[in-house]
Amino acid sequence: MTNSNTKHVDISNARYDDQREEMEKIIAAGHCPFCRENLHLYHKAATERETAYWTLTPNAWPYKHTKVHYLAILKRHAENLYELIKEEGADLFALLGSVQKEQKIPGGAMTMRFGDTKLSAGTIRHLHAHFLVPDRDDPEYQPVRFKIGSDRS
Ligand SMILES: [Zn+2]
């Protein structure tokens, strides 16, 4: 059996069966799926926008009850917030701010996991921000929950 917690991904935090299957392929290849040279291999959704430091793309596995779920993926490999330079932080806020303005999004959240996936509950260690808008129009609507802290011991 494949080790669930490898250098680049933590499959124990995957939420869907097809996501787990994709993670198995990534683990077998030994890739970081969010590094620029690998992103196109695993992420089928089109790039919505690129800035100097970030790639904006829809999440392939959006959270339940979201109307919008973008990922802003750092263009270089980093796993911790202290690795970010201030230009990357400023560029991220400018990017997500412009998405909110242009798409006239009245409210939502941006989140970013970092570091140890046992604590962050992240699936992919490479830093990426989530831009989330709940789908209040969905008849099955429930509040969107953002999890931190892995289920595994
Ligand atoms: Zn990476």
Image (cartoon, rainbow, N blue to C red):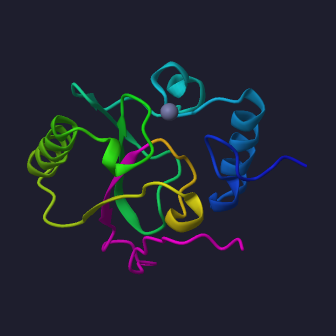
* Residue 68 position in % (x across, y down): 33, 55
Please state, as top left, top right, bottom left or bottom right, where the C terminus lies in the image. bottom right
Residue that protrudes farthest toward the front in the picture: 82
* 82 vs 67: above or below: above
Which segment is the magenta one? 127-153
Query: At x 64% / y 29%, what residue is drawn?
Result: 31
Which of the 4 image quadrants contains residue 84?
top left
- Give the image location of residue 54, x and y in percent: 29, 33
The residue at 38%/72% (across/down) is 138
Residue visible at 70% across and 45% down in the picture: 6
> Is residue 136 rendered magenta in the image?
yes
Q: Nearer the viewer, residue 129 or 142?
A: 129
The total of numbered circles placed on residues is: 0
Q: Is residue 119 above or below residue 104?
A: below
> Magenta stretch: residue 104 in it?
no
**Foreground residue, 64 or 117?**
117
Overall secondary structure of the magenta section = loop
Where's residue 91, x and y in %? 16, 37
**Which residue lies most toward the top here?**
37
Q: Quadrant of residue 83?
A: top left
Residue 32 screen position, x and y as percent: 58, 33
